[in-house]
Image (cartoon, coloured by chain):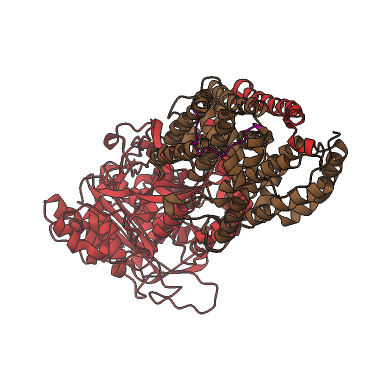
Amino acid sequence: MSRPERPRTSPITPRERTNREAGWKGKWDGSPVRRRALADFDWWLLLAALALVAIGLLEIYSSTAHTRYAGLHIRQFYWVLLGLAIMWTVVFVDYHLIIEQTPVLYIIGVLMLLVVLVVGQTISGSKRWLGYGAFSIQPAEIFKIILILTLARYFSERRLRTLTWVDMMQVGVLAAIPFVLILMEPDLGTALTFFPILGVGLWLGGIRWKMLATLALGFVLILPLGWFVLKPYQRARLMTFTHSDADPLGRGYQIAQSKIAVGSGGLLGKGFLQGSQNRLGFVPYRHTDFIFSVVGEEQGFLGVLVSLLLFIFVIFRSIQHARSARDRYGVFLVMGVAALLAFHVVVNVGMVIGLMPVTGIPLPFVSSGGSSILSTFMALGLVLNVRMRRYAN
Amino acid sequence: MDYRELFTDETKTTVSRIGAIEHVVGAVFLILLAGFGYLQLIQQGRYTDLAERNRIRTIPMVAPRGRILDRDGRVIVDNRSSFSIALLRENTKNLETNLPAISAGLELDIAAVREDIKRFKTTPSFQPIIIKEDATEADVAFVDAHRLEYPELEIMMVPRRAYPKDGLAAHVLGYVGEVSADMLESHDNAAWQPGDLVGKSGIEKEYNDFLTGKDGYKRVIVNSRGREMGRLEQVDPVPGNELRLTIDLDLQRVAEQELGDRSGAVVVLNPQTGDVLAMVSHPDFDPNQFAGKMTPADWNALQDDPRKPLLNRALQARFSPGSVFKVIMAAAGLEAGTLKPDTTYYCGGTVMMYGTLFHCHGGHGHGTVGLHQAIVNSCNIFFYNVGKLLGIDRISYYAHKMGLGEKTGIDLPNEDPGLIPSPEWKLKTKYQPWYLGETISVAIGQGPVGVTPLQLVRTVSGIALGGVFHTPRVVTLNQNEGLKGAAANASNERFALKPETVDIISRGLWGVVNEGGTGFEARIPGYDICGKTGTVQVVGSGAKVNHAAGSEFGNHGWFVGFAPRENPEIAVAVIVEHGGYGGDISAPIAHEIFRTYFMKKQGKQTPGTVIQLTALHKPVAVEENVEAGTPANFADNTKGAHKP
């Protein structure tokens, strides 16, 4: 406190800072993994994630067998292998190295979002995909991770106990650029995932209650304006959510059929491959966004309970890793991932039983879809990464 | 910036705020679990029901009506399969918004569809409403292609009646149509539902219960597009009973052809049993028109046609019997004793009775005539005298006893009882006393006397049998075992006539045909054809009317005959409206029928047997089908009736 202020000569990099914090005086030794760190790898977390993947593969099989999507579980399996490889890569690169490259990643991500708007594949009215056929990915999905990294770096390096309005503006602009680009695809669901990441960042970054209240008030005031930004189908979805029983064969059809599927599953479910709502095609998008309705119908409340407990395990164990993180970078990274996962699970699962509006965001680890699997395993890799390096060495 | 601040580990303050996040996430997950618990544990029953209702659909399977065969077992009426487009109201909630597109796609009148839906308002919503019958391939494709948008549309396979395309025996067979609102209300046992097909006339109406099958249904598993994925339960429809008629297709065909385009009626009877061998009424109609949905315009056109094609002239139209009535007069006179076999009267062409001048035909008179000559030459003057002696009461009594003025009791609906006038009848209906002069008119079958061709042939042939009047039948019990009820039982009324009465009349009627009488055109040497002609003047209201054959006021020509003279086994009545003299126009028709009958009896090929079943339904390609020996193609949907 009483020390005289020293002038900064050059911006300090995350690596330098971490090294200093750890009392590391010498040069970076270049070894990506330490023996000690590998011993701290959280196998339980990976196991829980793989259990969810297994549930997903089974239900993808059940919901696509004898349809034109038959064999999708095989493709999903390869995506999972690719996801694990990426996760492994992420795990073995010190997260400080990753954070260091955030500006580059941010620019690349924004460029990809711009590219997708120009040359992306248009599928059911949205330009979301880059690539060809089965090997398409959604840049927006990947950008969620980039946003976590960006905010983690921003908040970690804001070392004041509280946030100022200037911080708010800077963070706001950083998030708003990709947010608007993703809304233009349009992909409202993915765009909405920015809010929990941003929210957790602000909260952990030390936002004051007064500022929070002001933000909340502003949000409520701006919300009606958002109505005019929404596309007609998005408005219809929201209308359906608020008046769910008004139109059970029209727009409310998905929700109504999904609820029937889940409700008719009962305690023990109808059994694997036995769900009539699933097999007869009453629930649309049942291998992607509505896959949890298949879990509910075929595996019953027990299956739901097991799946949700696995998610709770993954999320809360991640939060524990945030607590034990070595530095603020780690805390923000892991909490960003936890927030993202929790938001996905809550919105998706809530949507299946009509507690949330239909936003079209996938269930992590479970829903069929390459981009989702890749970004989720990337996120999981970050958590494992932070956990492995919780001790300064 | 404070150096220490920069290097101080700040994770603590950050971590302290994590707890709040944990609580929020935990609480949200609890809410989710509660939501699933509510749905899956508490509301499970309700959602299980909904899931079942989603996947299971009950589809009615319409039973085909029984086929109708002729007396030799040849098929007259069969069924063909057709597609109907049904509306399943329970499958949709935005029917009203979809209706315009559906109507356009199926080329339907939207007002008519709305009307249909309105009619079914009181029925449960799972009951399908047929909005289009005999759907085309395009219609079926439309429904198939729009299963997702219009889940309320369903394609149903419905058996439909296939009648002979040329209107053969149309009036006997009748037609089927959708059960009317009146019938639905009047029928107490609720056997019918809106949209059911029931017999509306003819055999189809009379034997509706016997012909109607029992509809089945199937409960099928359907996917979200309504496509059938599996079957849970199926109750097969039970086809209706096959009904064998007394109609002989050979005779029917010949009678149809001989009457041709002229309007009139032909009835062929076996007087010994009452079996109706042929019954023709022209102009006819195509019963196939009724088998599908009929437009009001088509219906009105048939109803309002001045030629009255829907009327079965054989038993629903009342004609003056004309000279044929002389047979009844002769029998009545002989039985009453007012006419002796050797009675003669002088015919001078005219006679004055009760202050009115009555004419004989021909003008110059027949001279002194006995009963035999009076019948052969159809002398009016002779029968004026017979009638004068008998008086109206006895004429009425004997006519009734011999089956006139009353329904014959044939097993076809809406029979006309005819009319045999009496002073009581006149007083009751016209509030006028009976004028004796009217008796003279009645004696030659003019005046208010009204008979149906069926009555007349039954009465004349019954007299030839010695006074046995069988109830005419188009269906008999001995050919249809499962048939219950008195309707199928042949019965007869006896009014025993003196053998000499029968003998003298039969000989007279033989003479009409074989001794150069008015019916000579019916003669077949060696076959003892007997008969009586009649020519009825059509009274027009105008002062000057044209009695030429074919005109609106042309004479109706009768021929009623039987063969052989003793124990006749075939009796024929022919009436041609506005056709001219009975001997010229009707006797030749009867001649062809007698000829066919005896040819067939001797095992020869008849003009009728040449025409195979295939010809009935597909006259265009007769030869082709006969050669190939293929069964009738009932699925053929050629529009319009063919007149070969």
Q: Position of residue A315 (x, y in %)?
A: 62, 28
Q: Which chain gets the brown colouring? A: A
Q: Which residue is painted at 48% across and 40% down in the image?
A: A86
Q: Which residue is painted at 27% across and 44% down in the image?
A: B465
Which quarter of the rendered picture does the C terminus of chain A lie within? top right
Which quarter of the rendered picture does the N terminus of chain A lie within? top right
Front position in the image: A207 or A183: A207
Front position in the image: B557 or A290: A290
Question: Does residue B432 lie above or below B411 as drawn?
Answer: below
* Residue A317 relative to residue B557: left or right: right
Q: Position of residue B155 (x, y in %)?
A: 44, 48
* Residue B360 relative to residue B30: left or right: left
Q: Is residue B219 visible?
A: no
Front position in the image: B113 or A220: A220
Q: Position of residue A167 (x, y in %)?
A: 79, 47
Q: Is residue B612 visible?
A: yes
What span is in magenta?
Answer: A22-34
Q: Which chain gets the red colouring? A: B
